[in-house]
Image (cartoon, rainbow, N blue to C red):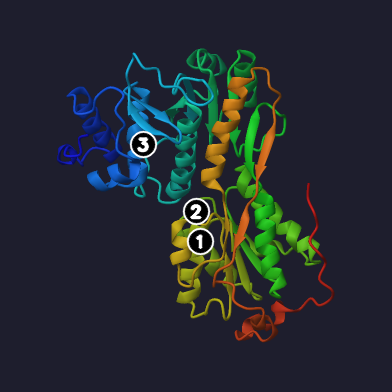
């Protein structure tokens, strides 16, 4: 079994492409024999000194070329036309091709400093789902004719299935594609007409849990920094914020809502400065993303305010930087990997059972409590004079959490 080809990688290329080319060369040169099992992913990552996900992306490319077969629980094998490797579901691995629209395997912090981590995690789930269910995932990140229904129908007329992510395709186009027999599954589209099956993260409930946590700590003036409300997940996070305030009998103050569409750290910091300039500034912040929350932490430090002793902060998504923030950020864990994986599972079920009814599956969001909120003792004696009036101004019995369908 060959392990000495790491030196051929040309790192100026995308690493996963270069790795795929190195492995393909080994296969074509006979270093791997037909039917031979390739090294496990962790060993390949160590041998080539690349990330585990880079190996998965490289294997996906080789699988799409038909050079390897991936058997869940058994490993990855060099393709042998005389030995048709099949999955436990009796479907040949990668015998089905599905298109993923709006998301792809190329991620770089420099290209998308706001969303690259969340997209990476979701794509990882989709790629792993493709391996498990024997579906080759072909990515189309930019179409250019999203509103042209005839063009879309022509592009995907032979596609067994589509997974939609962050795409502007109209519901009319989705309906027409399904009428043509194309299985369609969306991720967090939050459609209202039932045009296609969907995996949804219960983001509204997640926001409710975040704000409820702050309310239980005694906060009553809670600022929210949220993204573009034309995007469903941001609109739902704002609704969850409002739900929590209503459940606890706290009046909604429009001045405490800042809509900040870009999501960069700098914009989160600017939103915090705007809220701190209010006559009664918030004693706590809920940010609709961790990037915004980390920006808020920076602005609070700049203003000389201590977190969590004087101000509390909660984010959303639980990206890698959340735990490393100073202080570590309380946030809502967004099941990004799981939503990608479950989208492929649902697509597989539609492909196995043509004519299956449209359904929506919701995944829960989970509150992850770290140090940026502090203990409830802080609420009884706020140390920042300008915040005393707002912290416990509203007294009375706390209302129990409302249940939502």
Residue underneath mark 1? 268
| Left or right for 290, reference 23 | right
Residue at image position (68%, 35%) is 360
Give percent across and percent down for residue 46.
27, 48
| Kind of element beneath mark 1 | helix
Q: Pick whichever, 219 or 136, lies toward us.
A: 136
Give percent across and percent down for residue 206.
65, 54
Give percent across and percent down for residue 296.
51, 66
Q: Quadrant of residue 310?
A: bottom right
Quadrant location of the N terminus in the rendered image: top left
Q: Earlier in the sequence, mark 1 or mark 3?
A: 3
Total labels drawn = 3
Residue underneath mark 3? 57
Asked if the residue under mark 2 is in contact with the one under mark 1, i.e. CB atoms within 8 Å, the reply is yes
Which is closer to the viewer, label 3 or label 2? 3
Q: Earlier in the sequence, mark 1 or mark 2?
A: 2
Disc 3 versus disc 2: distance between alpha carbons?
A: 28 Å
Q: Quadrant of residue 72?
A: top left
Residue at image position (49%, 69%) is 328
Residue 263 is marked as 2
Residue at image position (49%, 40%) is 125
């Amino acid at each position: 079994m060959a392990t000495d080809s790491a030196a051929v990688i040309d790192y100026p290329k995308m690493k996963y492409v270069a790795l795929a080319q190195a492995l393909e060369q080994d296969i074509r040169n006979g270093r791997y024999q037909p039917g031979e099992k390739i090294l496990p992913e962790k060993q390949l990552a160590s041998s080539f000194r690349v990330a585990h996900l880079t190996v998965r992306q490289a294997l996906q490319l080789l699988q799409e070329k038909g050079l390897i077969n991936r058997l869940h629980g058994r490993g990855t094998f060099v393709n042998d036309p005389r030995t048709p490797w099949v999955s436990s579901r009796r479907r040949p691995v990668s015998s089905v091709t599905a298109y993923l629209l709006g998301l792809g395997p190329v991620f770089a912090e420099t290209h998308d400093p706001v969303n690259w981590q969340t997209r990476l995690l979701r794509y990882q789930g989709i790629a792993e789902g493709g391996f498990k269910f024997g579906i080759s995932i072909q990515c189309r990140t930019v179409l250019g004719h999203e509103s042209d229904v005839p063009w879309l129908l022509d592009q995907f007329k032979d596609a067994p299935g589509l997974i939609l992510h962050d795409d502007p395709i109209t519901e009319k186009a989705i309906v027409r594609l399904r009428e043509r027999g194309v299985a369609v599954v969306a991720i967090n589209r939050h459609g209202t007409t039932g045009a296609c099956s969907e995996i949804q993260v219960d983001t509204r409930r997640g926001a409710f849990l975040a704000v409820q946590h702050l309310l239980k700590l005694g906060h009553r003036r809670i600022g929210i920094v949220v993204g573009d409300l034309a995007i469903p997940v941001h609109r739902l996070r704002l609704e969850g914020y409002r739900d929590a305030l209503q459940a606890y009998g706290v009046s909604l103050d429009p001045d405490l809502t800042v809509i900040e569409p870009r999501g960069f750290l700098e914009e989160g910091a600017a939103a915090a400065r705007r809220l701190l300039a209010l006559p009664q500034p918030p004693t706590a912040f809920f940010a609709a993303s961790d990037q915004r929350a980390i920006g808020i932490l920076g602005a609070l430090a700049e203003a000389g305010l201590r977190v969590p002793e004087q101000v509390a902060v909660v984010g959303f998504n639980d990206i890698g930087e959340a735990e490393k923030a100073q202080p570590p950020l309380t946030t809502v864990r967004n099941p990004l990997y799981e939503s990608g994986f479950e989208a492929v599972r649902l697509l597989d079920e539609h492909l196995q059972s043509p004519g299956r009814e449209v359904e929506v599956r919701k995944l829960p969001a989970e509150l992850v409590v770290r140090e940026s909120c502090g203990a409830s003792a802080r609420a009884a004696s706020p140390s920042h004079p300008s915040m005393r009036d707002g912290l416990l101004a509203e007294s009375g019995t706390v209302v129990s959490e409302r249940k939502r369908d």
